Amino acid sequence: MTGFARHYLLAVQFFTRIPVTGALAAWVGFSPEQLRASAAHFPGVGWLIGAVCGLLAAGLLAGLPPHPGAALVVAALTTVVSVLLTGAFHEDGLADVADGLGGSLVRERALDIMKDSRVGAFGALALVLVVTVKLSLLALIGAVNPVALCWGLFAAHVVSRFFPLLLIRSMRHVGDDARSRSKPLADRISGTSLLVAAGWVLAALLLVGWLAPVLPLAAPLLLGAVVTGLLRRWFARRLGGFTGDCLGATQQLAEVAFYLGLALALAP
């Protein structure tokens, strides 16, 4: 259990802006092997982000006037909070992938563009479109079923953080090994780690099924898996593998796909 806690806290430290510092950081420690093991807890980080966003949504919906526009306010504020908690870590990956793959058809040039910290036209457009779609879907879900919005936020943050691990498991890393923060994660993710990650997801789905049994989950899960499969095929064809930015982009698009599936499943 000590190793489990250390790996989880290292995942929180790596994937969020939540402070794990001082004596706690010293206790957690760091090594490439530990970072690799912490990948199993990526969906566990989603538990933390999703719980904060879901509870915030519930509190706001209880306090705001009973108006359809309240759902849009909740969608915007929970998105802001999720970005603050993660430091836009995954959104940055989405922008870099859009700039690289949109900016050049040549593999080597695309990879070079993705290493550039500046955001280009393709990256900016991708961020605007994805955030707009995310806000629209969350507002729609909240207007139709406020309970689905709260629990959907929680489940989406957990599930969407499992899908990038499938890329690590099934593809080779093609980023800059010397500079890439994701390289230790990309070296290898064991079957045991993948099972631990799946355990985080299963526990979340069981919790949602117990406390919100009417929430339809099959369509969101299926759509998230389909989007991940399409992204995997695209990355394989254009890059011959994945980079850390590809993982962030996959999380973001899988999250949006989850919301879309939930919105479709709520239709009468």
Image (tube, helix red, strand yellow):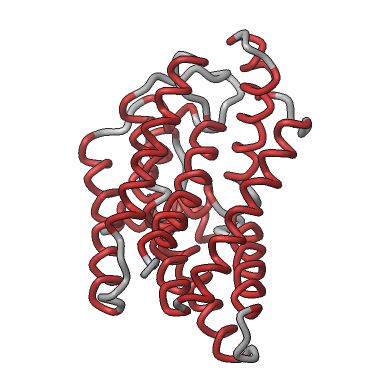
Is residue 175 visible to us here?
Answer: yes
Q: How many labels does the image show?
A: 0
Where residue 68 appears, as percent x and y from the top left, is 61, 80
Q: Quadrant of residue 16?
A: bottom right
Return the residue nearer the eye: 225 or 183: 225
Residue positioned 42% across, 66% down in the render: 152
Position of residue 19 relative to residue 87, above or below, is below
49 lies left or right of 92? left
94 lies left or right of 253? right
Position of residue 195 relative to residue 173, above or below, is below
Return the residue nearer the eye: 266 or 200: 266
Where residue 113 appears, as percent x and y from the top left, is 70, 20
Q: Quadrant of residue 228?
A: top left
Where residue 211 appears, as percent x and y from the top left, is 29, 79
Return the residue nearer the eye: 174 or 66: 66
172 lies left or right of 15? left
Is residue 22 visible to us here?
Answer: no
Residue positioned 50% across, 60% down in the render: 24
Image quarter in which the N terminus is found? bottom left
Residue farthest to the front, as pictured: 268
Position of residue 240 relative to residue 19, above or below, is above
Residue positioned 47% across, 72% down in the render: 149
Residue positioned 25% across, 63% down in the render: 203
Position of residue 25 relative to residue 68, above or below, is above
Where residue 116 appears, as percent x and y from the top left, is 73, 25
